[in-house]
Amino acid sequence: MNTINTPKRTVWPVWLALLVLTTLLAGCAPTIPNDAMTLTEDSLQERQMQTRTFETSDEATLLSASAAVLQDLGYLIEDSETKCGLIVTSRDRDVTDAGEVLAAVLLGALSGVPVPWDEHQRVIASLVTRPIGDEKIAVRITFQHMVWNSSKQLVRNETINDPEIYQEFFSKLSKSVFLTAHDL
Amino acid sequence: MKRLRPCLLLLCALIVGTLLLGGCAQRQREIFETSESQLALRSMQTRVFDTDDKNTMLRTVIATLQDLGFVVNEADADLGTVTATKRSGYALKVTVSVRPKGKTQMIVRASAQYNIYIVEDPEPYQKFFAALSKAAFLEANQIE
Protein backbone atom coordinates (compact mmCIF):
# COMPACT_ATOMS: atom_id res chain seq x y z
CA MET A 1 0.00 0.00 0.00
CA ASN A 2 1.36 3.34 -0.99
CA THR A 3 1.93 5.79 1.76
CA ILE A 4 0.94 9.37 1.16
CA ASN A 5 3.80 11.47 -0.23
CA THR A 6 5.66 13.62 2.22
CA PRO A 7 4.35 17.21 2.07
CA LYS A 8 7.67 18.56 0.69
CA ARG A 9 7.15 16.89 -2.71
CA THR A 10 3.70 18.36 -3.30
CA VAL A 11 4.33 21.91 -2.03
CA TRP A 12 5.71 23.52 -5.19
CA PRO A 13 2.70 22.82 -7.47
CA VAL A 14 0.46 24.37 -4.82
CA TRP A 15 2.58 27.53 -4.72
CA LEU A 16 2.63 27.68 -8.51
CA ALA A 17 -1.13 27.25 -8.64
CA LEU A 18 -1.59 30.02 -6.07
CA LEU A 19 0.65 32.29 -8.11
CA VAL A 20 -1.34 31.57 -11.27
CA LEU A 21 -4.60 32.16 -9.40
CA THR A 22 -3.45 35.49 -8.00
CA THR A 23 -2.29 36.65 -11.42
CA LEU A 24 -5.55 35.65 -13.05
CA LEU A 25 -7.68 37.37 -10.42
CA ALA A 26 -5.47 40.47 -10.44
CA GLY A 27 -6.20 40.77 -14.15
CA CYS A 28 -9.85 41.37 -13.37
CA ALA A 29 -9.80 45.12 -12.63
CA PRO A 30 -6.85 47.16 -13.91
CA THR A 31 -6.28 50.66 -12.54
CA ILE A 32 -5.71 53.60 -14.86
CA PRO A 33 -2.27 55.30 -14.94
CA ASN A 34 -1.82 58.01 -12.30
CA ASP A 35 -1.22 60.83 -14.74
CA ALA A 36 -4.23 60.06 -16.95
CA MET A 37 -6.37 62.79 -15.39
CA THR A 38 -3.62 65.11 -14.15
CA LEU A 39 -2.59 68.47 -15.55
CA THR A 40 1.17 68.15 -15.95
CA GLU A 41 3.88 70.63 -16.92
CA ASP A 42 3.61 69.23 -20.42
CA SER A 43 -0.09 70.18 -20.55
CA LEU A 44 0.74 73.88 -20.90
CA GLN A 45 3.39 73.25 -23.57
CA GLU A 46 1.00 71.04 -25.50
CA ARG A 47 -1.70 73.69 -25.29
CA GLN A 48 0.69 76.26 -26.74
CA MET A 49 1.74 73.93 -29.55
CA GLN A 50 -1.85 73.08 -30.45
CA THR A 51 -3.42 76.57 -30.20
CA ARG A 52 -3.31 79.83 -32.16
CA THR A 53 -5.43 82.94 -31.75
CA PHE A 54 -7.00 84.97 -34.52
CA GLU A 55 -8.20 88.57 -34.32
CA THR A 56 -11.78 88.11 -35.35
CA SER A 57 -15.16 87.63 -33.75
CA ASP A 58 -16.58 85.59 -36.63
CA GLU A 59 -16.48 82.06 -35.23
CA ALA A 60 -18.62 80.53 -37.95
CA THR A 61 -16.27 81.65 -40.74
CA LEU A 62 -13.22 80.45 -38.84
CA LEU A 63 -14.83 77.04 -38.28
CA SER A 64 -15.86 76.79 -41.89
CA ALA A 65 -12.36 77.71 -43.08
CA SER A 66 -10.86 75.12 -40.71
CA ALA A 67 -13.14 72.44 -42.14
CA ALA A 68 -12.03 73.41 -45.64
CA VAL A 69 -8.33 73.22 -44.74
CA LEU A 70 -8.80 69.79 -43.17
CA GLN A 71 -10.63 68.59 -46.28
CA ASP A 72 -7.71 69.86 -48.38
CA LEU A 73 -5.38 67.81 -46.21
CA GLY A 74 -7.44 64.71 -47.01
CA TYR A 75 -9.50 64.47 -43.82
CA LEU A 76 -13.15 63.43 -43.77
CA ILE A 77 -15.53 65.14 -41.38
CA GLU A 78 -16.91 62.71 -38.81
CA ASP A 79 -18.81 64.99 -36.47
CA SER A 80 -19.39 68.67 -35.92
CA GLU A 81 -21.20 70.84 -33.40
CA THR A 82 -21.03 74.51 -34.30
CA LYS A 83 -22.62 75.64 -31.04
CA CYS A 84 -19.57 74.25 -29.20
CA GLY A 85 -17.15 75.17 -31.94
CA LEU A 86 -16.19 71.56 -32.62
CA ILE A 87 -15.19 69.70 -35.79
CA VAL A 88 -13.96 66.08 -35.67
CA THR A 89 -12.25 64.61 -38.73
CA SER A 90 -10.34 61.47 -39.60
CA ARG A 91 -8.07 60.13 -42.31
CA ASP A 92 -7.28 56.50 -43.12
CA ARG A 93 -4.17 55.60 -45.10
CA ASP A 94 -2.32 52.54 -46.26
CA VAL A 95 1.19 52.89 -44.85
CA THR A 96 2.65 49.67 -46.26
CA ASP A 97 6.26 50.35 -47.17
CA ALA A 98 8.05 48.05 -49.64
CA GLY A 99 11.35 48.27 -47.78
CA GLU A 100 9.74 47.38 -44.47
CA VAL A 101 7.86 44.45 -46.01
CA LEU A 102 11.07 43.09 -47.57
CA ALA A 103 12.95 43.38 -44.29
CA ALA A 104 10.10 41.70 -42.41
CA VAL A 105 9.89 38.83 -44.91
CA LEU A 106 13.66 38.25 -44.78
CA LEU A 107 13.71 38.37 -40.99
CA GLY A 108 10.80 35.98 -40.88
CA ALA A 109 12.54 33.57 -43.23
CA LEU A 110 15.75 33.66 -41.18
CA SER A 111 14.14 33.31 -37.78
CA GLY A 112 11.28 30.99 -38.77
CA VAL A 113 8.81 33.30 -37.01
CA PRO A 114 6.53 35.49 -39.19
CA VAL A 115 7.28 39.20 -38.74
CA PRO A 116 4.43 41.67 -39.38
CA TRP A 117 4.79 45.14 -40.93
CA ASP A 118 2.83 48.37 -40.51
CA GLU A 119 -0.21 48.44 -42.76
CA HIS A 120 -3.01 50.86 -41.84
CA GLN A 121 -2.87 54.26 -40.19
CA ARG A 122 -5.78 56.28 -38.90
CA VAL A 123 -5.36 59.92 -37.84
CA ILE A 124 -8.10 61.72 -35.91
CA ALA A 125 -7.96 65.53 -36.00
CA SER A 126 -10.24 67.29 -33.55
CA LEU A 127 -10.58 71.07 -33.79
CA VAL A 128 -12.21 73.43 -31.27
CA THR A 129 -12.78 77.19 -31.54
CA ARG A 130 -13.27 79.28 -28.43
CA PRO A 131 -13.94 83.02 -28.23
CA ILE A 132 -11.62 85.02 -25.96
CA GLY A 133 -13.39 88.27 -25.12
CA ASP A 134 -15.09 90.00 -28.06
CA GLU A 135 -12.18 90.44 -30.44
CA LYS A 136 -10.25 87.18 -30.48
CA ILE A 137 -10.91 83.51 -31.11
CA ALA A 138 -8.60 80.67 -30.06
CA VAL A 139 -8.37 77.66 -32.38
CA ARG A 140 -7.03 74.44 -30.86
CA ILE A 141 -6.41 71.29 -32.89
CA THR A 142 -5.27 67.88 -31.63
CA PHE A 143 -4.01 64.99 -33.74
CA GLN A 144 -4.06 61.36 -32.60
CA HIS A 145 -2.89 58.42 -34.64
CA MET A 146 -3.37 54.68 -34.58
CA VAL A 147 -1.39 52.15 -36.63
CA TRP A 148 -2.36 48.54 -37.28
CA ASN A 149 0.10 45.98 -38.66
CA SER A 150 -0.41 43.18 -41.18
CA SER A 151 -1.50 40.87 -38.33
CA LYS A 152 -4.30 43.38 -37.52
CA GLN A 153 -2.72 44.29 -34.19
CA LEU A 154 -2.79 47.87 -32.92
CA VAL A 155 0.88 48.81 -32.70
CA ARG A 156 0.60 52.55 -32.14
CA ASN A 157 -2.01 54.46 -30.25
CA GLU A 158 -0.96 57.99 -29.28
CA THR A 159 -1.32 61.76 -29.59
CA ILE A 160 0.97 63.34 -32.19
CA ASN A 161 3.51 65.68 -30.60
CA ASP A 162 5.42 66.97 -33.61
CA PRO A 163 5.18 70.82 -33.61
CA GLU A 164 5.74 70.98 -37.38
CA ILE A 165 2.46 69.25 -38.11
CA TYR A 166 0.55 71.82 -36.06
CA GLN A 167 2.57 74.64 -37.61
CA GLU A 168 1.69 73.43 -41.10
CA PHE A 169 -2.01 73.32 -40.31
CA PHE A 170 -2.12 76.84 -38.83
CA SER A 171 -0.07 78.22 -41.69
CA LYS A 172 -2.68 76.91 -44.15
CA LEU A 173 -5.57 78.16 -42.00
CA SER A 174 -3.99 81.57 -41.67
CA LYS A 175 -3.68 81.88 -45.46
CA SER A 176 -7.23 80.67 -45.91
CA VAL A 177 -8.81 83.35 -43.69
CA PHE A 178 -6.31 86.15 -44.48
CA LEU A 179 -5.58 86.59 -40.78
CA THR A 180 -2.33 86.14 -38.82
CA ALA A 181 -2.18 83.15 -36.52
CA HIS A 182 -0.84 84.40 -33.20
CA ASP A 183 0.75 82.22 -30.56
CA LEU A 184 -1.17 81.76 -27.36
CA MET B 1 2.21 7.28 -9.86
CA LYS B 2 4.10 9.39 -7.31
CA ARG B 3 4.95 11.96 -10.02
CA LEU B 4 1.34 12.09 -11.17
CA ARG B 5 -0.07 13.50 -7.92
CA PRO B 6 1.65 16.95 -8.12
CA CYS B 7 0.63 17.24 -11.79
CA LEU B 8 -2.97 16.44 -10.93
CA LEU B 9 -2.85 19.04 -8.16
CA LEU B 10 -1.56 21.69 -10.57
CA LEU B 11 -4.20 20.80 -13.14
CA CYS B 12 -6.94 21.06 -10.53
CA ALA B 13 -5.65 24.45 -9.43
CA LEU B 14 -5.60 25.75 -13.00
CA ILE B 15 -9.16 24.56 -13.60
CA VAL B 16 -10.31 26.23 -10.39
CA GLY B 17 -8.45 29.37 -11.39
CA THR B 18 -10.16 29.53 -14.78
CA LEU B 19 -13.58 28.98 -13.20
CA LEU B 20 -12.91 31.71 -10.65
CA LEU B 21 -11.80 34.11 -13.39
CA GLY B 22 -15.04 33.46 -15.25
CA GLY B 23 -16.87 34.02 -12.01
CA CYS B 24 -15.02 37.25 -11.49
CA ALA B 25 -16.30 38.71 -14.75
CA GLN B 26 -19.82 37.60 -13.83
CA ARG B 27 -19.46 39.19 -10.40
CA GLN B 28 -18.39 42.48 -11.98
CA ARG B 29 -21.53 42.52 -14.11
CA GLU B 30 -23.67 41.78 -11.05
CA ILE B 31 -21.98 44.54 -9.07
CA PHE B 32 -23.33 47.20 -11.38
CA GLU B 33 -26.83 45.85 -11.37
CA THR B 34 -27.58 46.61 -7.72
CA SER B 35 -29.13 50.02 -7.06
CA GLU B 36 -26.79 50.62 -4.11
CA SER B 37 -23.58 50.54 -6.16
CA GLN B 38 -25.16 52.54 -9.01
CA LEU B 39 -25.77 55.28 -6.46
CA ALA B 40 -22.15 55.16 -5.29
CA LEU B 41 -20.92 55.35 -8.89
CA ARG B 42 -23.24 58.25 -9.70
CA SER B 43 -22.01 60.14 -6.65
CA MET B 44 -18.40 59.57 -7.70
CA GLN B 45 -19.05 60.75 -11.25
CA THR B 46 -21.21 63.82 -10.57
CA ARG B 47 -20.68 67.39 -9.36
CA VAL B 48 -22.90 70.47 -9.21
CA PHE B 49 -21.69 73.91 -10.33
CA ASP B 50 -23.27 77.29 -9.53
CA THR B 51 -23.86 78.53 -13.06
CA ASP B 52 -26.82 78.69 -15.43
CA ASP B 53 -24.77 78.92 -18.65
CA LYS B 54 -24.86 75.44 -20.18
CA ASN B 55 -23.00 76.31 -23.37
CA THR B 56 -20.08 77.99 -21.59
CA MET B 57 -19.86 75.06 -19.17
CA LEU B 58 -19.78 72.63 -22.09
CA ARG B 59 -17.03 74.60 -23.82
CA THR B 60 -15.06 74.67 -20.56
CA VAL B 61 -15.43 70.88 -20.32
CA ILE B 62 -14.07 70.57 -23.87
CA ALA B 63 -11.10 72.85 -23.10
CA THR B 64 -10.33 70.94 -19.88
CA LEU B 65 -10.43 67.59 -21.68
CA GLN B 66 -8.06 68.93 -24.33
CA ASP B 67 -5.70 70.18 -21.60
CA LEU B 68 -5.74 66.69 -20.05
CA GLY B 69 -4.59 65.24 -23.38
CA PHE B 70 -7.94 64.01 -24.68
CA VAL B 71 -9.14 64.34 -28.25
CA VAL B 72 -12.80 65.27 -28.51
CA ASN B 73 -14.74 62.78 -30.65
CA GLU B 74 -18.30 64.09 -30.42
CA ALA B 75 -20.38 66.84 -28.88
CA ASP B 76 -24.03 67.79 -28.88
CA ALA B 77 -24.87 71.24 -27.55
CA ASP B 78 -28.61 70.62 -27.23
CA LEU B 79 -28.13 67.36 -25.39
CA GLY B 80 -25.22 68.88 -23.48
CA THR B 81 -22.80 66.01 -24.00
CA VAL B 82 -19.16 65.61 -25.00
CA THR B 83 -17.22 62.40 -25.65
CA ALA B 84 -13.42 62.31 -25.79
CA THR B 85 -10.65 59.73 -25.89
CA LYS B 86 -7.10 59.78 -24.57
CA ARG B 87 -4.63 57.48 -26.32
CA SER B 88 -1.23 56.85 -24.72
CA GLY B 89 -0.80 53.15 -25.31
CA TYR B 90 -4.23 52.71 -23.73
CA ALA B 91 -7.66 54.08 -24.62
CA LEU B 92 -9.39 56.13 -21.91
CA LYS B 93 -12.82 57.19 -23.14
CA VAL B 94 -14.91 59.76 -21.29
CA THR B 95 -18.45 61.05 -21.77
CA VAL B 96 -19.38 64.24 -19.93
CA SER B 97 -22.95 65.49 -19.73
CA VAL B 98 -24.05 68.95 -18.61
CA ARG B 99 -27.64 69.57 -17.64
CA PRO B 100 -29.48 72.23 -15.68
CA LYS B 101 -30.48 71.76 -12.04
CA GLY B 102 -33.18 74.27 -11.24
CA LYS B 103 -32.53 77.75 -12.59
CA THR B 104 -29.13 78.50 -11.11
CA GLN B 105 -27.07 75.32 -11.24
CA MET B 106 -25.61 72.76 -13.65
CA ILE B 107 -25.08 69.04 -13.00
CA VAL B 108 -21.95 67.71 -14.65
CA ARG B 109 -21.51 63.95 -14.89
CA ALA B 110 -18.37 62.24 -16.24
CA SER B 111 -18.34 58.51 -17.10
CA ALA B 112 -14.95 57.01 -17.91
CA GLN B 113 -14.03 53.73 -19.54
CA TYR B 114 -10.44 52.40 -19.52
CA ASN B 115 -10.01 50.04 -22.48
CA ILE B 116 -12.98 47.74 -21.84
CA TYR B 117 -13.43 48.41 -18.11
CA ILE B 118 -15.64 51.01 -16.42
CA VAL B 119 -13.54 53.24 -14.16
CA GLU B 120 -14.82 52.70 -10.62
CA ASP B 121 -12.01 54.40 -8.74
CA PRO B 122 -13.02 57.84 -7.34
CA GLU B 123 -9.56 59.38 -7.77
CA PRO B 124 -9.55 59.98 -11.55
CA TYR B 125 -12.97 61.63 -11.27
CA GLN B 126 -11.75 63.84 -8.41
CA LYS B 127 -8.78 64.92 -10.54
CA PHE B 128 -10.99 65.65 -13.53
CA PHE B 129 -13.39 67.80 -11.50
CA ALA B 130 -10.46 69.61 -9.86
CA ALA B 131 -9.15 70.55 -13.32
CA LEU B 132 -12.65 71.53 -14.53
CA SER B 133 -13.30 73.58 -11.41
CA LYS B 134 -10.06 75.49 -11.96
CA ALA B 135 -10.86 76.15 -15.62
CA ALA B 136 -14.40 77.30 -14.87
CA PHE B 137 -13.43 79.42 -11.83
CA LEU B 138 -16.28 77.68 -10.03
CA GLU B 139 -16.42 75.26 -7.13
CA ALA B 140 -17.36 71.64 -7.79
CA ASN B 141 -19.96 70.62 -5.21
CA GLN B 142 -20.88 67.07 -4.34
CA ILE B 143 -24.32 66.00 -5.43
CA GLU B 144 -26.73 65.55 -2.53
Image (cartoon, coloured by chain):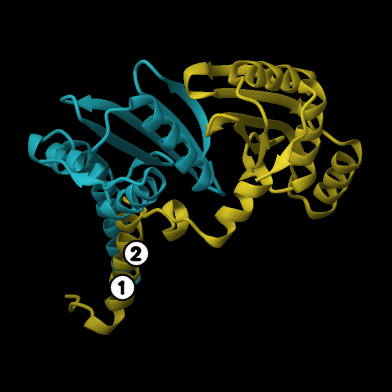
Most extreme residue toward the front is A134
Q: Is residue A90 left or right of residue A14?
A: right
Q: Amino acid at mark 2?
A: Cys
**What subunit carries mark 1?**
A
Colour given to chain A in the rendered image: yellow
Residue labelled with disc 2:
B7
Residue B79 visible (yes or no): yes
Which image quarter holds the C terminus of chain B?
A: top left
Q: Could you say whether the residue bearing mark 1 is in a helix, strand or loop?
A: helix
Q: Is residue A17 left or right of residue B76?
A: left
Q: Residue at x 47, y 56 (%)?
A: A39
Instruction: Choose between B52 and A164: the one closer to the eye.
Output: B52
Choose top left, top right, bottom left or bottom right for residue B80: top left
A107 to A71, vertically: above or below = below
Q: Do we see residue A147 in this rendering?
A: no
Mark 2 near mark 1, Cβ–Cβ under 8 Å? no
Q: Residues within 10 Å of mark 2 (few under 14, many from 20)?
A: some
Image spot of residue B78 (x, y percent)? 36, 15
- Which of these two is toward me, B120 or B63? B63
Q: Secondary structure at mark 2?
A: helix
Position of the N terminus of chain B, as image quadrant, is bottom left
Residue holding disc 1: A15
Q: In this picture, is B10 found above or below B130?
A: below
Q: CA distance from mark 2 to mark 1?
A: 13 Å
Chain letter, colour cyan in render: B
Please state which amino acid type lies under the numbered disc 1.
Answer: Trp
Find residue A140 and report its image quarter.
top right
- Across and down, in percent, residue B58 comes to 39, 30
Residue B78 versus residue A157 in the image, above or below: above
At x 19%, y 38%, the residue is B42
